[in-house]
Image (spheres, grey):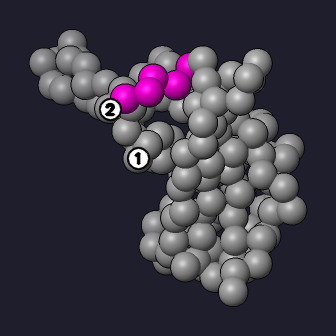
Amino acid sequence: MSTVVSPTFTELPIPPSVNGIWRAVRTKRGRTRVIMSKPYAAWLGVAVPLLRAGMDKVRVYPVCLVVRIRAGKGWRQGRDLSNALKAIEDACKHAERIADDNTEYVTGIRMTFTPAERGKPAACFVGVEQGGT
């Protein structure tokens, strides 16, 4: 049985879709470069400090990343749940809560969706469990 590393889940705003986190731009020399989108950079600017404040740094691996998305204002009902995952993984890494998001460190992901709660906006809750499965 897995044990929770972070005693509580950290609440984050809903991340941008994986389809919109990177942008291809042309350089003055005519080459294409991929850069972080402004909405993604802004979301990381909010999410990373929240993770640093609310989630313990993982010291024992492998782990299972545990994510719960709560519907509400800010979540489009037809959106794919998995499109939120990459930004969440990246935020955990940027916040230095996990060493990396590759399979050497994260060997399991459990992601669930829950209905909206009256009067509450959409949100994302993130935690980790030891064991990775």
**Element type at marker 1?**
helix
> What residue did someone put label 1 on?
82
Mark 2 burial class by Cα count in 10 Å: few <14, some 14-19, many 20+? few
Judging from the image, what secondary structure is the residue with disc 2 in? Answer: helix
> Which residue occupies the foreground of this view, 24 or 3?
3
Residue at (71% x, 29% y) in the render: 117
Q: Residue at x 25, y 25 (%)?
A: 24
Q: Quadrant of the N terminus?
A: bottom right
Find the residue positioned furthest to the left. Answer: 30
Looking at numbered disc 2 in the image, what kind of residue is underneath it? Asn
Q: Position of residue 80 (x, y in %)?
A: 37, 39
Q: Is residue 47 left or right of residue 38?
A: right
Determine which quarter of the picture holds residue 78. top left
The residue wearing badge 2 is 19
Q: Quadrant of the C terminus?
A: bottom right
Up-down relation of residue 105 to residue 27 (above or below): below
- Residue 77 sits inside the magenta stretch: yes
| Along the viewing direction, whichever of 131 and 115 lies nearer the viewer | 115
Q: Which residues are magenta?
A: 74-78
Q: Nearer the viewer, mark 1 or mark 2?
A: 1
Question: x, y percentage for residue 126?
Answer: 68, 50
Q: In the current view of this chain or complex, which residue is farthest to the bottom?
A: 1
Q: Position of residue 51 (x, y in %)?
A: 75, 45
Give the Cα distance between marks 1 and 2: 11 Å
Residue furthest to the top: 28
Q: Kindly report the secondary structure that dominates the magenta region of the rendered protein.
A: loop
For residue 35, say whether it is visible. no
